Each structure stands twice: as structure tokens, then as C-alpha cells.
Image: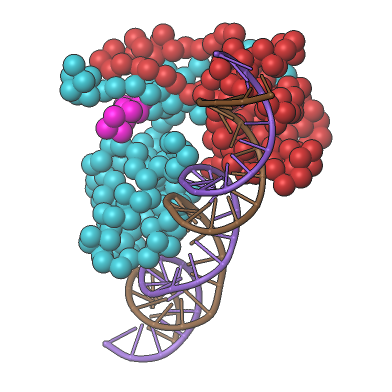
Chain colours: A red, B cyan, C purple, D brown
Amino acid sequence: MIEHVNYRELLRTHDLKVTEKRLSIIEYFSDLNKYVSPKEVYEHMNALYPGISYDTIYRNLYTMYEVNILEQSTFEGELHYTISCSDHHHHHFICEKCGLIKVVQYCPVEIWKDELEDVKINSHKIELYGLCTKCQKKAA
Amino acid sequence: MIEHVNYRELLRTHDLKVTEKRLSIIEYFSDLNKYVSPKEVYEHMNALYPGISYDTIYRNLYTMYEVNILEQSTFEGELHYTISCSDHHHHHFICEKCGLIKVVQYCPVEIWKDELEDVKINSHKIELYGLCTKCQKKAA
DNA sequence: AAATTATAACGTAACCATTACGATTTGTAA
DNA sequence: TTACAAATCGTAATGGTTACGTTATAATTT
């Protein structure tokens, strides 16, 4: 998780102008620790800034994804974003019920590179799905 | 890859009526060995059966996915399908250039279960992306 | 083989997430 | 504080997907 310290700095680092809306979006994500859809972001932002444009939401989400402030994933056909844990390679467990994220460290990409020696692996996507501790208890 | 043998049988096994369109869709996939979008399937089918309904394409793709004749994946925000290699657990390498699929055997799901002992892992998604041998040569 | 019934396909429009765009406002640097 | 580039607004368009009443076809029964 990115440190709270200074969202202004975070945006400046990536040559993005520091705007109210952007700060507000980052703040929304900062303690969320789950993937949310643009719609959810829109609803949150529209409460704070009534009449905010879709354009502002979608473009900012994508822009911040491009510079690695956010992570993007497609879940059931829809885009979802979460704040980026930018400092090291990792993957995610995602709770199917509540969307909670847990970071997973182990990554066997080197093993796959051996298995597929004739192709060039540029990237990979790994996601684990299931129920978090809380949602397991609720289900029982 | 499912054996060519008998697509009729394949459909009957899953309590699906054997129709021309369905046979034709399976035939289209049978030697393709890559993920394609519904649009691509539509274009192929519309050439064979001019005026074919979107409904027929989308519903059949989804139906055949449900009974595991096809596999589904989301790539750049769009659904994609390929014929299912239904007989064993595996994952895919997908060529970013031409869409070619290679099957990957190794799967570390047990390691992840150890790492995340407090959650219940129900499923997982693993995909490797890069360039196949042919597309590497073309690029050079 | 004909009749019956359940499922599939047709034709078309609606839905909905996402994107586009000209006009306006705001942030930043000179 | 002026000027310019970038961001936001407001709104409409786009495009993949789904919905649905009607018609056709496959499978089952008589």
C-alpha cells in the first residue's frame, strides 16, 4: 500500500496536475483495500461533487492506472481498480463476497519460463478467488 | 483439445440439441487453438449463415461455456472464447500478437493455499502473455 | 411417419459500461 | 498576474452484450 504521506507529491511525481478531484479519488482508495468499479467511484465522488462528469472519473482512473498509482483488473466483465502496492512484485487474493484483497507473495513465473522455453513471456496475470475469513464465518 | 470424433455426441452429452449452428461454431473453434471474441465468431458465422442473430452467437457461446465445451476469458475488456481442453487442470500462455495458445501444466495453487491459510481459495486465474516463437521471429 | 412439445434461432431494439468531444475552468510556470 | 497547458463539464455517441416476442427446428411420442 502506498504511504499516506503526500498524495500531492505522488501526483507531481508522475507529472499529473494536483486537482481536488484526483486527491479525492486517491483518498477514497487509500484505506479501502479492495477492488471497486468505476461506478462505485462515481457514486462516491458524485456525493462529494454533485454533477461530476463520468469523463473525470473514467479518465482519472485510467490515467492513474497508467502511472501505476492504481491497479486494474477485470472482474465479471467490468473494470475494477484498487490502490497500487507499487513497491514489489505480488499478486492478489480477492474475496468473492466482499472484494477484500490479500497480497500473495509467491510467484512461479521462473518455473513457467522453463516450461515454455520457446516463447517469450512478457507479463502474467494471477488472481486467486474465494472467501476471506470474515465471509466464511458469515456463511456458516 | 477435444477430439474431433463426434461433435453431435459432445452436444448430446450435455443435453444440448444438435443444431447446424452449434456444430458450425464448434467446427470453427476446433482447429483454431486461440481465443477469439464473439464478434469474430459472429463474422465467421454470418458468412456461412447470412443474417444470423447476435442472440444465437452470444447465447451459444455462453451455453457451451457453461457445459465446459468452451473456455472463457476476458482480454482487454472483451470476452473471448476458445475450445476447452477439458480433461485436466491447466493454464494458458497467450501470444499477444496472434492470440496463439499454449497449455501450461505447472500450477502452484497448493503453495498459495499454504501461504493464505486463513482464507478459502475456491478458484484462480492464471494467464501468461508474451510472444510465440513465430511472432518473435517476425518482430526481429 | 405424423403430431407434439421443448428448445433454438430470428429480427430487432434496449441496455449499460465506457468513450468522445467542444466549451469552460483550473493548475502551474513564466 | 498573465498565459498556456491540462483537467473538468455536460452531454451524446459508441459498441459489446442482453432481452424478448415470434417463428423455425430438433427430439420425442403416438
Quadrant for residue C12, please give it: bottom left
Which residue sits at x=40%, y=61%? B54
Q: Position of residue A68 (x, y in %)?
A: 56, 19
Residue B101: in magenta span: yes
Q: Which residues are magenta?
A: B93-102
Residue found at x 43% / y 36%: B75
Residue D8 or residue B48, whichever sits in front = D8
In front: D29, or A29? A29
**Rendered residue at 58%/21% (across/down):** A16
| Quarter where residue B57 is shown | bottom left
Q: Find out whether residue B19 is within the magenta segment.
A: no
Quarter occupied by the N terminus of chain B = top left
Task: Identify the image quadrant of the C terminus of chain B.
Answer: top left
Q: Position of residue B118 (x, y in %)?
A: 72, 19
Choose top left, top right, bottom left or bottom right for residue B68.
top left
Q: Can the viewer see residue B121?
A: no
Can residue A42 be seen here? The reply is yes
Image position of A75 with respect to B138: above or below? below
The residue depicted at 23 percent of the width and 42 percent of the height is B31
Q: Position of residue B110 (x, y in %)?
A: 56, 17
- Work out whether B47 lies above or below A25: below
Question: In screen coordinates, is C6 left or right of B47?
Answer: right
- In depth, the one of C27 and B19 nearer the eye is C27
Q: Is residue B128 left or right of residue B133?
A: right
Can you give x and y, in whole percent of width and height, for residue B67 in the image? Answer: 46, 49
- The total number of labels drawn is 0
